[in-house]
Image: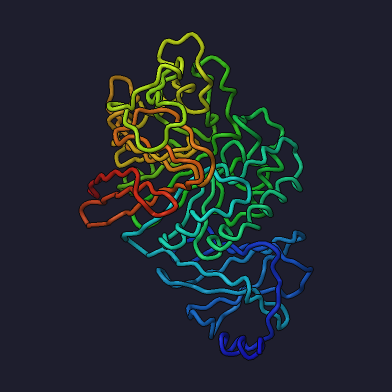
Amino acid sequence: MKLLLTILLLGSLSLPAATLVERGPWSGALTPTSAVVKAKIALKVDSLRLALTTNADLSRPFYVPAEKSDSRIATFKPKHLAPNRYYYYVLESKGLIDMQNRGRFRTYPDGPTSFTFAFASCARTASSHSVFETILRDNPLFFMNIGDLHYLDIKENNPDRFRAAYDLVLSSRTQSALYRSIPFVYMWDDHDFGGNASDARNDVHEAARLTYQEYVPHYPLAAGSGNVPIHHAFTVGRVRFILTDLRSARTPITVPDDASKTMLGSVQKEWLKSELLAAKSKYPLIFWVSTVPWLGINTTNYYPVPAGYTGFAHHRNLPPLPISQGAVYTRGASRAPPEDHWSLFSTERRELADFIKENGIKGLCILHGDAHMLAADNGSNADYATGGGAPIPILAAAPLDQAASIKGGPYSQGIYKPPAGEGCFGLVRVLDNGDRLRVVYSGRNHLNAEKVSLQFEVPTH
């Protein structure tokens, strides 16, 4: 019966079913004509191939061989694909087909296009929360995890520890189903790099970087391959996405906030500036993935909500604090909580804002996670250039299923602090209307209910 079902499903792939995959597969690095698919193989197999087809019943496939590797991670790089098409795939070896772990991806459209993507951060390790099912039902062009894929806080420079972390994440029923069906884009933050508030001092660089390159289907890294930071960029239609690695070269948050203090490091900062300059004349819309909040001033709490408060809050209409709650930190307080975001790197933040202003870079929007909340700002609170002149819209989406927290601000659209058990993500629609690009942001929970929203437009000329 199983063989008959396989024959009916596969057409020309009339071969017996098998389980070849231990973890995955998942796809990434999508372009209009290419993709990358990776999977951890359950057994040592020879002649492993990816059977790929535009037919949902998996009939009439073509084959892509696995790249040679000593690792149990098989990598496939199909090319010469058709733009804006769904491709369905299974792994095959010597007549054995892994139907149980079949996947799909959609190539990017070629040229100007409208599209939808989802992004979020901060999931409990191996979470199987239903928020991942909701993201899958929304069927975005890709899903972007922008930090804290897991919370294992690995502090040992051991590749096996990082491999085990990816294996745990991919063991999740809902996450693995999402990643088999929607292309994956990923930039780490602290908990999935070297532990809470990690920076360049953490002795995990080589293991974290090499394992990322081994396991994750990723775009080419700007710094090359090997023991290098993982910043990279990609394009969809007339939109440029720039993802920065804010952990590999970061100086400690405790050092004085002067010109030597950096989130990016000098090499990556020059790359970011060059990317912004190159995008200026080519892409009317640029999304910069910062991973950590851009908004905020150290020692300032814009949202002193009551303890245990959940739901929507706006800095101009806060719920009253009960007397029993005690003091909250405000600007000028003698002892402020450490802020693991741009408020403690304000000199570098101003440098970047001045660069954006002086070079007339328009259409920039920052995406971040880290803060366990949904939030958005229209740019009115996000202008840190000297004398003003660089307002930047901000979109924030978290947590996928971690406990809620509030950081930074203020946000023109307010913040949403989810109650326990609620998962959150951001859904972004980019509408290409020819002379203008319209961005429609919807911060949602796992029930697909909108909690925070923002819309803005950028001209294309």
Q: Is residue 228 left or right of residue 256?
A: right
Q: How is the image coloured?
A: rainbow
The picture quadrant where one finds residue 157 is top right
Residue 226 is situated, as x and y percent measured from the top left of the image, at 67, 46
Camera-side residue of 445 and 205 = 445
How many marks do you count on the picture? 0
Camera-side residue of 418 and 32 = 418
Residue at 67% across, 37% down: 153
In the rendered view of the protein, which quadrant contains the N terminus? Answer: bottom right
Residue 177 is situated, as x and y percent measured from the top left of the image, at 56, 63
Q: Is residue 33 left or right of residue 148?
A: left
Viewer can see residue 268: yes
Residue furthest to the right: 44
Residue 333 is situated, as x and y percent measured from the top left of the image, at 45, 10
Residue at 78% across, 68% down: 43
Residue at 57% across, 16% down: 255
Residue furthest to the left: 435
69 shown above or below 227: below
Camera-side residue of 206 and 344 = 344
Viewer can see residue 275: no
Residue at 68% across, 81% down: 17
Residue 209 is situated, as x and y percent measured from the top left of the image, at 65, 44
335 shown above or below 82: above
Q: Is residue 223 left or right of residue 165?
A: left
The picture quadrant where one finds residue 454 is top left
